Image (cartoon, rainbow, N blue to C red):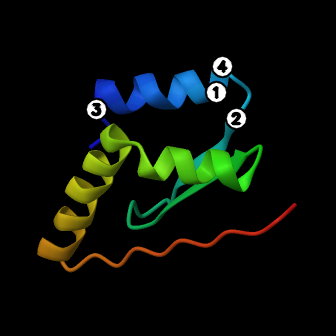
Amino acid sequence: VITDAFRVVAVELDLAGKRVLKSNIISEDGLSQTVVTIFDSEASRFDFVENSTIQSALNVRDMYCIENDISISQSSEDI
């Protein structure tokens, strides 16, 4: 669940040019979601995931996935 507080932090980074949400695609069957986000630096990505508001939302997401036997994966690459 994306909270309003999460959105505020994300939009602040977007407006500062530190993060760009490139795509958010849900598969036709609704079983997969792919989100592509580009950060201007590793430091900005680290700041994002370490932000307490973001961390709280990620913890809620992770618990939901665990409780519902949903797998989640993440990857990163330099571009």
Q: Position of residue 44 (x, y in %)?
A: 64, 45
- The amino acid sitting under disc 3 is Thr
SS category of the residue bearing label 2: loop
Which residue bears the numbered disc 2? 18
Q: Which amino acid lies under the numbered mark 4 shown in the image of this protein?
A: Leu
Q: Is 40 positioned to the left or the right of 24 in the image?
A: right
Neighbour tally class for label 4: few under 14, some 14-19, many 20 plus, Cα within 10 Å? few
Marks 3 and 4, Cα distance to the nearest angstrom?
Answer: 18 Å
Q: Is residue 72 above or below residue 61?
A: below
Residue 15 disc label: 4
Q: Are marks 3 and 2 in contact (CB under 8 Å)?
A: no
Residue at coordinates 76% horizontally, 69% vertically from top-left?
77
Whole-Å distance between the Cαs marked 2 and 1?
A: 6 Å
Residue in the foreground of this view, choosing between 57 and 28: 57
Q: On the image, which quarter does residue 71 sit in? A: bottom left
Give SS at disc 4.
helix
Q: Quadrant of the N terminus?
A: top left
**Upstream in the sequence, badge 3 or badge 1?**
3
- Is label 2 in contact with label 1 (beta carbons under 8 Å)? yes
Residue 4 in the image: state x and y as whole percent: 31, 24
Residue at coordinates 54% horizontally, 24% vertically from top-left?
Answer: 11
The image quarter in which residue 65 lies? bottom left
The residue under label 1 is 14
The percent coordinates of residue 28 (x first, y second) are 49, 59
Pick the front one: 33 or 14: 14
